[in-house]
Image (tube, rainbow, N blue to C red):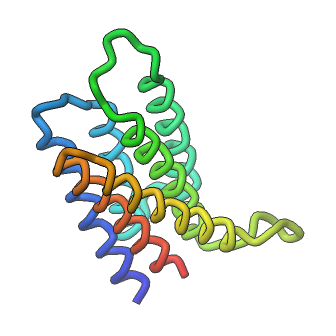
Amino acid sequence: MSEILHAWAVAPAAVGACCLAADRARVRPPEVVASVLMLLAMMDAAVSGIVAPVYWTALLLIAALALAVRRRPRQRRAPRVPALMTVHTTLGMVVMAGLQLGMGGHTTAHAHGPALAPVLIGAVVGYIGLSALAARRMPARLDRAQIAAMGASVLLMAAASV
């Protein structure tokens, strides 16, 4: 059952990537790259497993940091990307990185460390709440669709990992 949920989680991620790519009013290559990277990580985890989840986790965290630095608020020539969209995308990569790590087969950080599952559940619940808030606040239809698709994808991945 979890394999089916995991495969279904790829569909909203693909929709989200398409929404970003289709938005010709605002060119946002960093967000498109982030969305495609998350999609590739999910497809690899769902289908082939060629790259180890720990490497996807590291790559997603590095990409989240790069996006946050790239979209810092005080840039002069930054495109008009809502700050909430940048926060949502960046946190989406962080939550997705955690889910990749959590789905890697081990649910504990170490033999005497805390379990990873409660932390992931809290992160997913928080991200779903942020997604609902962000989807209501976005004026553009493609932005709302992209945010809803990312939220649905994270929710399905979380359900697949339980």
Question: In the figure, is residue 109 to the left or right of 89?
Answer: right
Q: Residue 57: give x, y in percent of width and height.
A: 55, 51
Instruction: Return the residue nearer the eye: 16 or 36.
Output: 16
Q: Quadrant of the N terminus?
A: bottom left
Out of 130 and 58, give the one closest to the viewer: 130
Residue drawn where x is 31% and y is 31% of the image: 81
Q: Is residue 125 left or right of residue 108?
A: left
Name of the residue lying farthest toward the top = 76
Q: Residue at horizontal 45%, vertical 52%?
A: 92
Position of the C terminus, as image quadrant, is bottom right
Name the spot of residue 156 as percent of width and height, x first.
39, 74
Q: Is residue 114 above or below residue 71?
A: below
State the image coordinates of residue 142 (x, y, percent, origin top left). Answer: 18, 49
- From this viewpoint, is residue 107 visible? yes
Where 145 falls versus 46 (above or below)? above
On the image, the x and y values in percent for residue 22 come to: 11, 43
Q: Residue at x 50, y 48 (%)?
A: 91
Q: In which quarter of the view is residue 139 placed?
A: top left
Residue 52 visible to the viewer: no
